[in-house]
Image: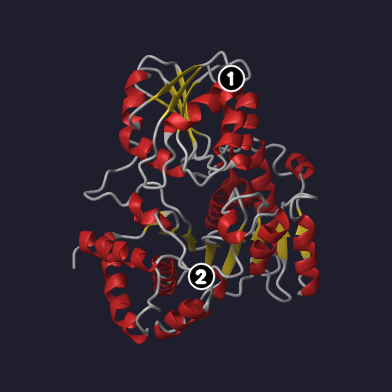
C-alpha cells in the first residue's frame, strides 16, 4: 500500500458518516490491544480555542522535557497534522502501517456498524502514541465530548475552553445543552479546568463537576494579567489567546503534583508556541501583510474582531471571507464586515460551502461604505488583491488551509487531503 492508497482508504470510511457513541470505539480499541491504557492524557473540549490550548499545553510539556503526543482536528492541509509527536507530523510510512493494521480489525464489525473515519483515526493515533512511548498525550475532542470517540480515555485532567453555539443541529440549540455535551469529558474524581464564562455554560460545567466529585478550576480574564503571562510575549495574538494561555497555565499547575513543570519551562513553552491559521500573520515578498484566522463561527468571528481592533485599530484591511452554509454567517458578517474597506466573498472549497452571493446584502447592511464583490475562488480573490497592503482571510479553517497552499506556506500533497475533514453525522 502506498500513502496515497492509505489516504483513499480513509476517504472510503467517510461513507459510514460520523456517529455519536462510544461502543464502536471501545470495541475497536479492544481489538487493537487497548493502547490508551498505556498512556496519560489531558483531554480538551470546548467550542473555540481547543486547538490553540492544546498547542500551548504541548509546547509547555515539550519544553519540560517530555515526549508529547498531540491529537487535533480538523487538519488545515495534510491529514498528518492530526497526529504529531513533539510537533513532528506522523510519517507517511507510519500512516500506511497503521491503516494496514486497522483493516483486519474492521472485520469484527457487522455490516452497517463499521467504524467511521474519526473512530478509526482515533484508534490509529492511540496505537501510534503507545508504540512511540509518549510520556503524555494532549487529546482534543472531535465534536462535543460526551459521545465523542476520544472520550474512551480517563485523563489526568479534563479541560473545557468555552461554550458557544456551534454544531447545534447535533449538540443542541442552547448553551446549556451544548455545555452538557462538552462537560461529558469530566470523569469522576478527575480534576477539571475551564475558561467558560458565567451565563455561557459555566454553571452547567460546575454542576457536572460537582456531580462527579471532580475538583474544578475556573479561569477568568483577570488571570491573563498574572505571572507568568504578564511578562510573556505570546506568539498567538488576541485577548482570546491570552485567555487560552491562562487556561493552559492553570492546567499545568493543577497537575503539578503528577507532572512537575519548572517555571522556566512554562515560560519557554508559551513563548515559543506555534499554531498556524489562528491570527497567523505573514509578510509576502511584495510587502503585503496577510493575516489568516480560521474564525468559523460567531464567537470565533467576534474574537477576531476584538483582536484586530486591538492590534490594528486604524486599519481598514481588505477581507476575504468564505463560510459554510450551516454556520451563522449573518452574525459572523456583522462582526467582521465593519472592519473592512473592501470585502471579497468567495466559496469555500467544500460541498458545504455557502453561496457567497447570498452574503452580499448582509455585508452591505453591516458596512454600507465597503466595496463588496463576489469571487469565483480564493485564488481569484487573492489575484484581485495583489496590490492590497493588508489582507485578512477568515470564515473557515478550510479556507485558511487553501490559503496556506496558495501562499506556499504548506506543502501541497499529490491528492487533496482537506476533503478528509468532510463528514456528515449518521443518525
Which residue occupies 37% across, 14% down? Answer: 387
* Label 1 neighbour load within 10 Å: few <14, some 14-19, many 20+: many
Which residue occupies 52% across, 80% down? Answer: 37
What is the quadrant of residue 405 in the picture? top left
Q: Is residue 253 above or below residue 41?
A: above
* 105 vs 258, nearest the viewer: 105
Say whether residue 107 is left or right of residue 346: left
* 338 vs 44, nearest the viewer: 338
Q: In the rendered image, is residue 190 in sight?
A: yes
Q: In this view, does 9 lie above or below 36?
A: above
Q: Report how far apart the C-alphas of labels 1 and 2 lie in the structure.
A: 42 Å
Which residue occupies 41% across, 42% down? Answer: 353
Quarter placement of the N terminus: bottom left
Q: Read off the residue under disc 2.
A: 149
Colouring method of the image: secondary structure
Q: Read off the residue under disc 1.
A: 367
- Looking at the rendered structure, the secondary structure element under dot 1 is loop
Query: Where is residue 141 shown, x and y percent of the image?
Result: 54, 62
* 118 vs 347, nearest the viewer: 347
Query: Where is residue 329 shown, x and y percent of the image?
Result: 55, 37
Amino acid at each position: 500500500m502506498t500513502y496515497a492508497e492509505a489516504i483513499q482508504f480513509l476517504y472510503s470510511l467517510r461513507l459510514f458518516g460520523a456517529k455519536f457513541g462510544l461502543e464502536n470505539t471501545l470495541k475497536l480499541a479492544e481489538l487493537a490491544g487497548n493502547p490508551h491504557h498505556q498512556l496519560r492524557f489531558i483531554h480538551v473540549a470546548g467550542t473555540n480555542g481547543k486547538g490553540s490550548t492544546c498547542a500551548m499545553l504541548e509546547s509547555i510539556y515539550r519544553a519540560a522535557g517530555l515526549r508529547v503526543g498531540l491529537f487535533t482536528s480538523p487538519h488545515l492541509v495534510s491529514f498528518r497534522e492530526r497526529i504529531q509527536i513533539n510537533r513532528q507530523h506522523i510519517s507517511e510510512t507510519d500512516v500506511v502501517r497503521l491503516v494496514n493494521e486497522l483493516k483486519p480489525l474492521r472485520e469484527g464489525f457487522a455490516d452497517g456498524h463499521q467504524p467511521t473515519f474519526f473512530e478509526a483515526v482515533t484508534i490509529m493515533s492511540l496505537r501510534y502514541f503507545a508504540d512511540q512511548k509518549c510520556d503524555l498525550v494532549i487529546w482534543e475532542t472531535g465534536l462535543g465530548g460526551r459521545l465523542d470517540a476520544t472520550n474512551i480515555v480517563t485523563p489526568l485532567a479534563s479541560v473545557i475552553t468555552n461554550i458557544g453555539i456551534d454544531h447545534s443541529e447535533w449538540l443542541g440549540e442552547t448553551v446549556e445543552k451544548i455545555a452538557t455535551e462538552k462537560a461529558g469529558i469530566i470523569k469522576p474524581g478527575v480534576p477539571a479546568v475551564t475558561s467558560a464564562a458565567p451565563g455561557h455554560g459555566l454553571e452547567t460545567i460546575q454542576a457536572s463537576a460537582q456531580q462527579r466529585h471532580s475538583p474544578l478550576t475556573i479561569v477568568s480574564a483577570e488571570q491573563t494579567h498574572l505571572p507568568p503571562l504578564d511578562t510573556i510575549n505570546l506568539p498567538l495574538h488576541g485577548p482570546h489567546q491570552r485567555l487560552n494561555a491562562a487556561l493552559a497555565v492553570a492546567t499545568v499547575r493543577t497537575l503539578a503534583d503528577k507532572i512537575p513543570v519548572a517555571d522556566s519551562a512554562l515560560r519557554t513553552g508559551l513563548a515559543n508556541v506555534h499554531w498556524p491559521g489562528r491570527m497567523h500573520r505573514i509578510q509576502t515578498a511584495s510587502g503585503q501583510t496577510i493575516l489568516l484566522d480560521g474564525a468559523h463561527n460567531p464567537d470565533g468571528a467576534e474574537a477576531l474582531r476584538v483582536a484586530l481592533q486591538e492590534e490594528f485599530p486604524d486599519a481598514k484591511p481588505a477581507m476575504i471571507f468564505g463560510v459554510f452554509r450551516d454556520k451563522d454567517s449573518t452574525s459572523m458578517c456583522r462582526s467582521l464586515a465593519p472592519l473592512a474597506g473592501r470585502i471579497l466573498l468567495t466559496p469555500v472549497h467544500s460541498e458545504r460551502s455557502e453561496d457567497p452571493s447570498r452574503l452580499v446584502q448582509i455585508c452591505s447592511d453591516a458596512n454600507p461604505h465597503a466595496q463588496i464583490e463576489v469571487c469565483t475562488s480564493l485564488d481569484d480573490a487573492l489575484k484581485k488583491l495583489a496590490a492590497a497592503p493588508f489582507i485578512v482571510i477568515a470564515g473557515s479553517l478550510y479556507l485558511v488551509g487553501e490559503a496556506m497552499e496558495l501562499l506556499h506556506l504548506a506543502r501541497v500533497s499529490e491528492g487533496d487531503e482537506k476533503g478528509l475533514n468532510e463528514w456528515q453525522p449518521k443518525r
